[in-house]
Amino acid sequence: MANPEKAAAVAELKELFSNSDAAVLTEYRGLTVAQLKELRRSLGENAEYAVVKNTLTAIAAKEMGIDAFDGQLAGPSAIAFISGDPVEAAKSLRDFAKANPQLVVKGGYLEGKALSEAEIKQLADLESREVLLAKVAGAAQASLSQAAALFQAPLSKTVRTAEALRAKVEEQGA
């Protein structure tokens, strides 16, 4: 790779890969510039959508140890580099692809693991982080309530037994 422009492009892609927690490879054939701009806006601040050159992306991914895109880099390709919540970005891509069927999600990777198109759709179907945290908090609170009731049960049983004994003694004494 003698061309310094290509070397700079590979270095930029490597930096994008290293700064992101996840990446989703898409094919954007048939989308207009306005639609791509809308897609970038819908992805939000925690994702960067970049049109990439297949050969240079393959080199950068190989140098970064990412094999998730092997054999998928063909045709007009773009990658959503996600540095925040991957669920939100996957939902944005899914929703945009529903409205614009020209966008094709090919695959991706999350924390070093390759993701298929189906796995990205499953990721998009997850509930938001806030909802999942609320469910965990609710489950933890329910567990604590059950534990409190469990610890309280022997004490209340002892009190009921003592009260029954006292009532029986009063009844026999009278």
Image (spheres, rainbow, N blue to C red):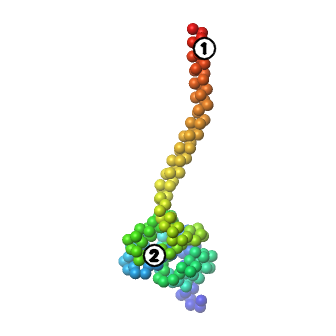
What amino acid is at disc 1? Val
List the single residue furthest toward the left. 34
Q: Can residue 11 be spotted in the picture?
A: no
Give the mark, 2 or 1, whose residue is nearer the N terminus.
2
Residue matched to label 1: 169
Residue 156, position as x, y percentages in the image? 58, 29
- Is 89 situated above or below 11? above
Q: Quadrant of residue 111?
A: bottom right
Residue 52, position as x, y percentages in the image? 50, 81
What amino acid is at disc 2? Val
The residue lying at 55 percent from left, 70 percent from top is: 115
The residue lying at 50 percent from left, 64 percent from top is: 122
Specify few, some or many for label 1: CA neighbours under 10 Å numbering under 14, 14-19, or 20 or more.
few
Q: Quadrant of the N terminus?
A: bottom right
Badge 2 vs badge 1, beta-carbon distance below 8 Å: no
Element under label 1?
helix
Residue 157, position as x, y percentages in the image? 59, 28
Residue matched to label 2: 104
Element under label 2?
strand
The residue lying at 56 percent from left, 80 percent from top is: 71
Count of numbered circles in the view: 2
Question: Mark 2 to mark 1: distance in Å?
Answer: 82 Å
